[in-house]
Amino acid sequence: MANSILTPTAVTREIQRVAHEKATFIATTNLSYDDSYAKAGAKIGTALKIRKPNKYTVRTGKTLAAQDTQEDSVTLTLATQKGVDMNFSSAELTMELDDFSKRIVQPATAQLVSVLEYDYLTAVTKKVWNGVGTAGTTPNSMLFFGQARAKLNQNLAPKDDQRSVQINSDAMAAMVNAYSALFHDQSEIKKQYRDGFISRNSGFDWYENDRIWTLTNGSDHTTVTVNDAAIADGDTTLTTAGGSVTAGTIFTIAAVNAVHPETKQDLGYLQQFTVTADATTSWTFTPAYYASGANQNVTALPVTAAAIVLVGSASTAYEQHLAYHKDAFAFVTADLELPQGVHFSARETMDGLSMRLVRQYDINNDNIPARLDVLHGYEAIRPEWACRITG
């Protein structure tokens, strides 16, 4: 087959194809594309608001008890521009697309996607407060993933085919071994024994991803208690006696149980929270606790001297595998401005992911540099629809 000159559009579409093959986490979350910037181009700092479902209380009896509707939303900011810069010559643009992709597109795109995925996974996992697993033990049992599934169910995550898990290679190897003695259909058995991974089980699509976040605990996890006399509904701060914690640390408080989001019945286990910033005795956390009203999520507010239990040992690192519904997280891109008067430029959008490629001749240095850019933002919009499996 004769070589043909590769056009900007052909190259950018090939970049998109490779990106989608490698973005195992990004592609399984809510990919939102804002086409309002398709002509002028978006800017860093552009804010998008994502509405969350409204909450109400249920009346008993015939007397009207009207409730105000309080719109709740999450603001997601297009705050980051990332890219890969490279050089390729005019001669390379006359290669067959497969060769060009193998030599130039795939290495550059793989690096970009790897960084995007790691940043995204790290940021949103820290905001997930549901957690299961045994700290210090690689997940090696169906029980852990069944418990994660239960957490999603209890928090009303849709029971559909849009649930996924992200686990590293060690956990995948352990789980393939754990599943080996159980019944599977023929296609699943082939994947487990020939390819060494699980593709779907326990209500999840499984992905092997060594970019999962590792949490290193703070230096004090023992004998920590509440030391706060001014606790109220809606609080996201807490004063403690003892404790030195890092952002993303999960904790529970004695006698503060979780409730069903709709019926408000006691679920029989302690509500979990996650620290949102490194701290000693003045913590910020999520979710806010509410002991009454439409937002009620706990049976009672914490009291002074109540014991706080933190996951894991002090100053120890723990892998944070992740189970989630697609709509727990959102990754948003918008079109970057497409410059005029350059030698080579294109912007393509595929399944909500917008990428721009620009190439220009540098007459001073006789180089032909090219840049691949993504303007993006991400947020945990419904973190209750996700659950960590601590390893």
Image (cartoon, rainbow, N blue to C red):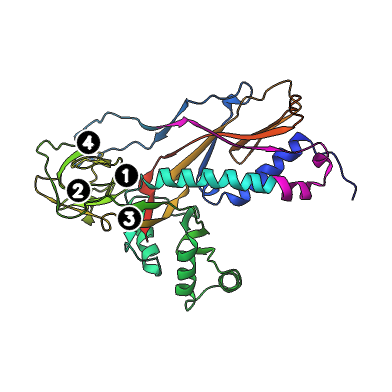
SS of the residue under disc 3? strand
Q: CA distance from mark 3 to mark 2?
A: 20 Å
Q: Earlier in the sequence, mark 3 or mark 1?
A: 3
| Residue 5 percent location from the top left of the image | 84, 38
Q: Earlier in the sequence, mark 4 or mark 3?
A: 3
Q: Identify the residue at horizontal 61%, vertical 34% (top origin).
A: 373
Residue linked to disc 2: 243
Q: Residues within 10 Å of mark 2 (few under 14, many from 20)?
A: many
Residue linked to disc 1: 247
**358 relative position to 125: left or right:** right
Proximity of marks 4 and 2: CB atoms separated by less than 8 Å? no
Q: Amino acid at mark 1?
A: Ala
Q: Magenta residues?
A: 75-104
Looking at the rendering, which quadrant does residue 335 occupy?
A: top right
| 136 and 17: which is toward the camera | 136
Q: Identify the residue at horizontal 89%, vertical 51% (top origin).
A: 1
Q: Amino acid at mark 2?
A: Gly
Q: CA distance from mark 1 to mark 2?
A: 13 Å
SS of the residue under disc 4? loop
Q: CA distance from mark 3 to mark 1?
A: 15 Å
Q: CA distance from mark 4 to mark 2?
A: 22 Å
